[in-house]
Image (cartoon, helix red, strand yellow):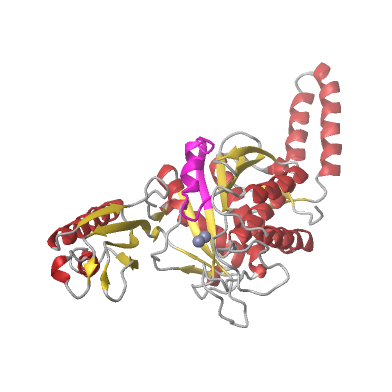
Amino acid sequence: MIIIVVNLNLHFLFSHTNPFLMGSFNLFCFFIIIFHVFVATPIFSHSSSSISTKFLDLAKSPEVFDWMVRIRRKIHEYPELLYEEFKTSEVIRAELDKMGISYKHPVAETGVIGYIGTGKPPFVALRADIDGLPIQEMVEWEHKSKVDGKMHACGHDAHTAMVLGAAKILKHHEDQIKGTVVLVFQPAEEGGAGAKRVLEAGVLDKVSAIFGLHVAPAHDLPVGHVASKAGPLLAGSGMFDATIHGKGGHAAMPHFAIDPVLAASSAVVNLQQLVSREADPLDPQVVTVTNFHGDGAFNVIPDSVTIGGTFRAFSPESITRLKDRIHQVITGQAAVHRCTAEVDFHEDKKPLYPATINDDKLHEHFLEVAKNVVGNKNVHEMQPVTVSEDFSFYQEALPGYFFMLGMKSHSGEPLATLHSPHFTVNEDALPYGAALHASLATTYLLNHDGANKIIDMDFGLAM
Ligand SMILES: [Zn+2]
Ligand SMILES: [Zn+2]
């Protein structure tokens, strides 16, 4: 309607300056007015808060919600491990095809990068991880994993459905998007650093911000609640395996053997001091030994023992320090006990994951959007957690923001933790994730378009 007023003013101006032009311009204005009367009837001026509310209504509508549930269940039935997400990738591409969303494939083996909007800057990305885990599902339900020993036990099936849900909403409003939303369906989050491979493919070079979420069974967050914080949110991590070589022999005559069990035990005990005695108490760090294997018998000292585990910290310096010291302690303790040791950090297969550190400005953006989508009282500040996410690779390359999405039902039933064979997704959370994704991207583009702080959007629920 504002445009009509502007056109009438121009008409008025022209009618007093050039009578010849008047005729054709008059006609032009007439058509503009007619056009807007027809097309503009259901158009309203909306603030970003109104956009968020309407997106949540859309995401909750059966057409979007039921569709997301169907996709999530379909993906859940056929979980695939890192860099083998071929069927999952196919499902994603089929849905993008149906929606008329263009995409690049393959990216990082099985990844799919979709595009909605003008195809021009600014670019903002929404990320979903698509891989499952080598876990046998123990939940008995209609859509239980049909692949033995594999399960979507980290909710990545739900993450994928939610970004597709956001895509459906955004595609419906594509002509009103002030820039380009980049959909990132990324493989191999679980140990394969798929995010790093996506970045290396160069597909995010023009992107100026990226958003990601994780379903949160362990944070006591109900459905419709979210939590995050500025700065360090999740730890960086690495893994290690070590083999300690001694000399096997009869357990009754240890002086003829070189005992790797004692050397490995000493290494495990001494690894404990890396955090308790060497780390700044105000800089949280973890070293955990999770396995210890020797192939001796009750009366046999083995030739060698293997140990392994993980380490976590919130800064690159602390991660590097832990890595160096783990190597020194294990080889040093092996030497003390006349053994030798090899330590492998498997960085070729699983690079060290950086800490997930949220951008301060995007935190402000998230707070504004999340309060509009889920309500002020349902947006929570959370403490950092020592789990890791490969979303952190994106944040090393560009401003990024990661948050937790509540799943706890209102009856308060506790949910199994992530990576548990009993893990379940509360599908009621899906519309919140989809609406948050869509709102975070749309309002980010609005705020960075430079011209439009208010958007005219058709929020008709019919899609
Ligand atoms: Zn996981
Ligand atoms: Zn995960």
From where the camera sits, is residue 243 visible?
yes
In-front residue for pair 299/272: 299
Q: Is residue 190 magenta?
A: yes
Q: Residue at x 54, y 58 (%)?
A: 213
Q: Residue at x 51, y 72 (%)?
A: 417
- Quarter of the image containing the N terminus? top right
Residue 105, by quadrant, is top right
Q: How many labels, in total? A: 0
Q: Does residue 371 appear to the left or right of 252 in the view shown?
A: right
Residue 61, by quadrant, is bottom right
Q: Picture coordinates of residue 32 (x, y %)? A: 82, 34
Q: Does residue 377 appear to the left or right of 101 in the view shown?
A: left
In-front residue for pair 411/350: 350
Q: Picture coordinates of residue 352 (x, y %)? A: 37, 51
Q: What segment carries the magenta color?
A: 188-211
Q: Picture coordinates of residue 141 (x, y %)? A: 70, 73
From where the camera sits, is residue 280 visible?
no
Residue 259, compared with residue 101, is above or below; it is below
Residue 423, by quadrant, is bottom right
Q: Is residue 367 magenta?
A: no
